[in-house]
Image: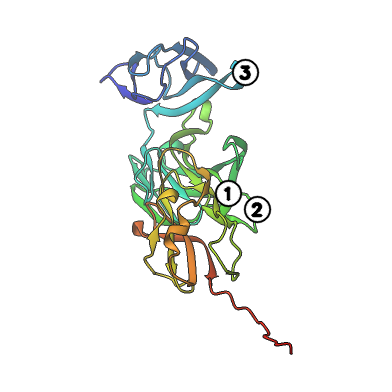
Amino acid sequence: MMARPFLNARRLVLAMAPGLVAGAHAQDFIRQIQVIDSSSVIYDIPISSDNGEVLSEPLAGDSAVFQLYATATLANNVTELKKLDEKTVGTYLPKVTVEILSEDPYDPPRTRADQTYGVRIKIAGLRADPDAPAEAKQIQVVRRYRLYDDETFEVVSEGSQEGTYTFDSNGNFVDNAISQRLPGDPDLPTKVAGEESFVAMTQGGPGGSTSEMASATVQIWPVAEAAFFGIEAGKTYQGLPPVASILLRDLYPNSTTYVQVYKGPQRLGVIGDALPTSVLHYETYLPQKANLALTDLNSFLAEDGEYTLEALTMTPFNDGAPELLASISFIIDRTLNVNGMISTAE
């Protein structure tokens, strides 16, 4: 939601960003909150389209808060009202933007649990005048989280993380080395799923209350994992092994994953033969999982010797280079040694 004021006007034109309220319901609305004569006044302005402009109610006082609400349909046709966005406008308020920086260019921003990401905060209009109101002199940024279920990826908990960042000067502030701090299993820090938000706050809300100036959110997805089945590591097979399979979990939403085979023990950096039945490519918005039978493996085992299978994945991270998920080595020896004894009888 974006607020654009008319010059010298006491109303605002609220410009709806396309897609922010996709397929708007009749119950969707913008809530306008302000203080008039020491009392909080709330207006709910209905919206029926996901783009265009909405005229606010008359403004009074030095500031007002605008909150965008939408109706979401959940399981069993249960509806839930959700706040999608919040903006505060006012006479003395500075301009603040918050932006997430990730190696993955996808929008909305996302990253992987083992990767760092960045936040850019731009602040303009803060005043050094000691007589200026509090909302004109300082911005605070808080860090919040929402934790997802590791199967359904629905929100299971949310809260605020420790630490508040205070800004009392204008400028462009960037931190490119932020590690996720989702409260998951401490023994499995790369297997968490959720989101982290950085919210710029001010005391410029109605009646001096704290309200949001700007925010940005990054989704955090777990690191993929793989496991081979049907072949035992280190085992010698006197014929072609049974049909092998691979179980893949938490494949990154934008990724290409495959199994390769090559002769010899496992070695990093080897380029082997990719099994055609194993190649998976995703361009979606949630992690993926798969269970594949490697039915074409035996066609790559023409000679006896040691072989290695590797599961590799390519994502926007690691400069797009393949990353090893799992490996297994085994031996093919079709020579049958028979210890016999020849005897003669007289």
- Outermost residue toward the right in this view: 346
Query: Between 147 and 273, which is closer to the camera in this rendering?
Result: 273
Left or right, 128 with respect to 75, comes to left
> Can you identify the residue that label 3 sits on?
76
| Residue mark closest to the camera, 1 vs 3 | 3
Q: In the image, residue 108 lies at what x, y percent? A: 40, 38
Mark 2 falls on what kind of element?
A: loop
Between 150 and 109, the one lying in front of the other is 150
Left or right relative to 219: residue 120: left
Q: Quadrant of the C terminus?
A: bottom right
Q: Which residue is mark 1?
A: 192
The residue sitting at 53% across, 62% down in the picture is: 240
> From this viewpoint, is residue 10 visible?
no
Disc 2 target residue: 185
In the depicted structure, whether residue 7 falls above or below residue 246: above
Q: CA distance from mark 1 to mark 2?
A: 8 Å
Mark number for residue 109? none
Element at label 3: helix
User: Of the residues shown, which amino acid type is indicated by label 1?
Assistant: Val
Q: Residue furthest bottom?
A: 346
Q: Residue furthest front?
A: 346
Towards the viewer: 141 or 285: 285
**Residue 2 location (% of width, % of height):** 35, 26
Q: First in sequence: mark 1 or mark 2?
A: 2
Residue neighbourhood size for the residue with mark 2, other residues' Cα within 10 Å, grouped as few (<14), some (14–19), many (≥20): few
State which quadrant residue 188 falls in: bottom right
| Quarter that holds the N terminus | top left
* Type of amino acid at the residue the image marks with label 2: Asp
Mark 3 is on which residue type? Asn
